[in-house]
């Protein structure tokens, strides 16, 4: 059971490959959560653009943010590295061109508090930029996952 007085640390892992146009907004959405006990881990997957320098500049302003770099190995290897260095009780994967609603972590942790036997919580998505509006996901299926 989650201690009601100590909020568990949540690790937000952001894979980044050539995301210079979107990484700042993705990180901003992670750092702007209403749930504040978070760490944000960016894993640079061998970007050849300015992604790494953008993240390095953002780190100066927020100690909850860190970056790890590796040669290009693909998104699965990136997520695995982020998972290895994460210290949180809960893990959230956020792509470098996506954003989190500001209450996303709060809502997820609250669900786990109410039902600690759960191992996974996810939600529908909302499209932005080229398209907009809700994007409902199918009911969870472990084989598809």
Image (cartoon, rainbow, N blue to C red):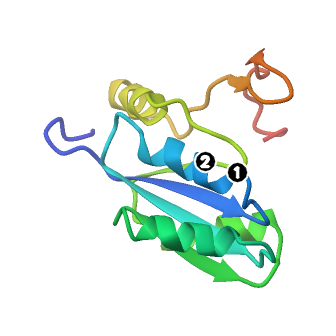
Residue 83 lies in quadrant: bottom right
Inter-mark Cα distance, 1 to 2:
6 Å
User: Could you tell me if residue 59 is visible in this image?
Assistant: yes
- Give the residue number, with chain letter if any, for mark 2: 26
State the image coordinates of residue 122 (x, y, percent, origin top left): 61, 31
* Residue furthest out toward the bottom: 71
For the point 86% across and 28% down, the residue is 130
State the image coordinates of residue 69 (x, y, percent, origin top left): 64, 80
User: Could you tell me if residue 86 is visible in this image?
Assistant: no
Q: Is residue 75 above or below residue 141?
A: below
For the point 62% across and 26% down, the residue is 123
Residue 99 lies in quadrant: top right
Q: Is residue 124 above or below residue 63?
A: above
For the point 53% across and 30% down, the residue is 101
83 vs 126, nearest the viewer: 126
Considering the numbered disc 1 on the image, is that residue within a helix, a strand or a loop?
loop
- Give the residue number, with chain letter if any, for mark 1: 22
106 vs 18, nearest the viewer: 18
């Amino acid at each position: 059971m989650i201690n009601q007085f100590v909020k568990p640390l949540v690790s937000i892992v952001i894979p980044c490959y050539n995301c210079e146009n979107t990484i700042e907004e993705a990180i901003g959405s992670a750092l702007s959560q209403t749930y504040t006990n978070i760490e944000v881990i960016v894993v640079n997957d061998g970007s050849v653009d300015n992604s790494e320098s953008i993240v390095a500049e953002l780190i100066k302003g927020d100690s909850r943010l860190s970056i790890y770099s590796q040669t290009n190995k693909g998104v699965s290897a990136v997520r695995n590295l982020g998972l290895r260095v994460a210290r949180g009780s809960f893990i959230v994967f956020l792509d470098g061109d996506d954003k989190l609603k500001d209450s996303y972590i709060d809502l997820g942790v609250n669900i786990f508090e109410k039902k600690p036997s759960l191992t996974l919580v996810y939600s529908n998505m909302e499209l932005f930029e080229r398209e907009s509006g809700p994007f409902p996901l199918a009911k969870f299926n472990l084989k598809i996952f």
